[in-house]
Amino acid sequence: MQDRPIVVAGAGSIGCFVGGLMAAAGHSISLLARPRVIDEIERLGLTLTSLEGSLHHVASRQIKLSDDPKLFADARFVLVTVKSADTAAIADAIARYAPKDAIIVSLQNGIGNAAMLRGKLPDMTVLAAMVPFNVIGKGEGRFHRATSGDIVIERDVAETAAQLSVPGLAMRASDDIAGVQWGKLLVNLNNAINALSGLTLREQLARRDWRRLFADQFAEGLAALRADGIKPRSATPVPPGWTPHLLRLPDALFRIALAPAMKIDPEARSSMWEDLERRRRTEIDYLQGVITEIADRRGLKAPLSSRIVTLIRDAEAKSEGSPRLTVEQIRQT
């Protein structure tokens, strides 16, 4: 148990789930959240469930809640869970209010967030991390982890990963967090495909036409990374280079070869689908947008990535939720 609190900066779905499980394990937890989220938790507490069947209820009295960044004042750890576009603003708040010995951990999608935090917090320890699972916000203080995996944190002398691990939320250290993050970015290229489809992840991955689309997107991303000298690492036993081939297998062979390793709740959809449904800005610039930037810089073509960026931006502009496109509509040039 920590004498000084762990502060979750930007308590949305991931932040509430992570912070809630840590509070259930006895850590002192503070959540920096929007007023709507604070109101839900104050009235109802947190109810945390997972595809494995776990259930935790955390009473509001077990968590300190605020929308004021002065909450950082006595933090021992700050877990950053804001969207990538909000990283600079939260870094400014941390710099103003957090003690210099606080350890900052970026639990965010994308590649450049830890670097931005380091640039704005040069006197503080900043660790990159990778969250492999997604969490569905179901309203009324309920958050459901719909996919599996352990959080991976950059190894440090304080053994932060070990300090933050709690039952039901394992964290492990890595000496190659950059490779792990690039591997996760390739997997996260499916976020936009899933958002455009309107299907659940299980429905999407059960169909070969959708898997082929994901395989082509994955291969396009992998080619860009290789051209840039980047070596992604997989969070699963399947090497990145094998993934497109496995995704293209016929349905029966796919179920034998890969599906058993993919623990996905029937309800699960990508966080980008949720962003579209809730009329929020997506992180497309930090996923497919990264691939198109590398491709442009290296003189490569990335037509599928470019097409998906355009479709997601169109969906954001229309503000009507998922456009529920077909594979053919997504591939159309």
Image: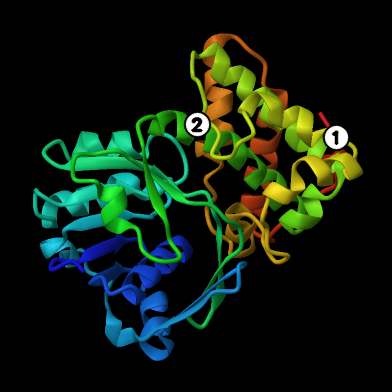
Q: Nearer the viewer, mark 2 or mark 1?
A: 1
Q: Residue flagged by tag 1: what amino acid is it?
A: Leu
Whether residue 200 is situated above or below residue 54 in the rendered picture: above
Of residues 1 and 268, the one drawn nearer to the viewer in this rendering: 1
Where does residue 232 sit, x and y in percent of width and height?
52, 26
Horizontal arrangement in the rendering, residue 38 relative to residue 93 (left or right): right
SS at circle 2: helix
Q: Is residue 89 visible?
A: no
Q: Residue furthest top?
A: 299
Q: Residue furthest bottom?
A: 43
Of callouts 2 and 1, the N-terminal one: 2
Where does residue 210 sit, x and y in percent of width and height?
82, 42
Whether residue 273 is situated above or below residue 193 in the rendered picture: below
Horizontal arrangement in the rendering, residue 263 relative to residue 234 (left or right): right
Residue picked out by circle 2: 182
The image quadrant where one finds the N terminus is bottom left
Of residues 46 and 333, the one drawn nearer to the viewer in this rendering: 46
Whether residue 63 is situated above or below residue 129 in the rendered picture: below
Of residues 255 and 43, the one drawn nearer to the viewer in this rendering: 255
The Cα atoms of the two marked residues, 2 and 1, are separated by 24 Å
Of residues 263 and 196, the one drawn nearer to the viewer in this rendering: 263
Q: Quadrant of residue 284?
A: top right
Residue at x 22% of width, y 56% of height? 77
Residue picked out by circle 1: 249
The image quadrant where one finds the C terminus is top right
